[in-house]
Amino acid sequence: MKFKFTVIILFIFGNIFAQGKGIFDTLPSISIGAGVLSFKGDVGKDNTVSPSSRMRAGYSIAIGQRINNMLDVSISGVFGKLTSTEYTTLVNRNFESKIKQFDVSVLFRTDELLSEFSLTPYVGLGLGFMSFDPHADLLDKNGNKYFYWTDGSVRDRTENIPNTITSRMLIHDYNYETQLKDSAVNYSRKAMTIPLTIGLNFSILNNLSAKIGLTYFMIFSDYVDNVKANGNNDSYTYSNVTVTYRFRKFDRKKAKIDDSRYDDVDFNKIEEDLRKKKQL
């Protein structure tokens, strides 16, 4: 499946570049964005905790090149953390992973096609690569292991009748100190991704614009949360606001001042008249 997706996307990219005859007629653009990363995987799928437990801040940077009046190609990076927490009567687990995501994408935009509108839609498709490293919060700040009791409490000992009196309540410190590993599989902590993007572009100035977008990343791995359960790969979304500055070539013809209206003016004579007046 991964090979088929890769071949299809490379075929699309090849056709786009073959048609982009004027790819270097314009200068590149730079984009900086910030938003929210939201994870979807095995940890948290049966979650009873708030949806915010699977969200973290993220940021992005991209360099884009306009191919024609509808297509852009961009090289971008997304950085941040993915996380999720699951507390049920049967399962109690959590994870957090720093990620670095790099991809090449094609954006189909409509800002020139719908130039009379300041707000225009765009969609994108890409091929990327990401690194991840899942860690878990298994110990409190004093190094005590968490034990989850059926009454919903978290304590420093296993649940049994004698420990009801002697055990101490613990509080999560949310310091994900323990690297997670699969006891049976030494899986790779790198994976290919396919980003799918949709959003709205808002034109501010001729060379400045802002975007509100959502990118869905299909990950070719089910180990981002260190759990491989149902055969479905993990994924995440990046909801973001981005500011883009597009560099433009300096047009000397347009910048040249039209002084043809002064062709009939004799500036030497004017200067001579002014000199005579000063002498009087």
Image (cartoon, helix red, strand yellow):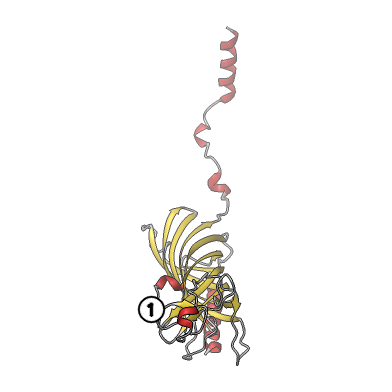
Q: Is residue 93 above or below residue 80?
A: below
Say which of 205 and 175 sits in front.
175
What residue is rendered at 56% in x and 55% in y? 247
Across and down, in percent, residue 185 comes to 61, 91
Q: In which quarter of the image is residue 30?
A: bottom right
Across and down, in percent, residue 168 comes to 49, 75
Can residue 47 be seen here? yes
Q: Quadrant of residue 271?
A: top right
Q: Name the residue under label 1.
A: 48
Give the residue type that dot 1 points to. Thr
Across and down, in percent, residue 223 comes to 55, 84
Q: In which quarter of the image is the C terminus?
A: top right
Q: What is the residue that sits farthest to the left in this orientation? A: 117
Neighbourhood count class around disc 1 (C-alpha, 10 Å): few under 14, some 14–19, many 20 upward? few
205 to the left or right of 63: left
45 to the left or right of 20: left
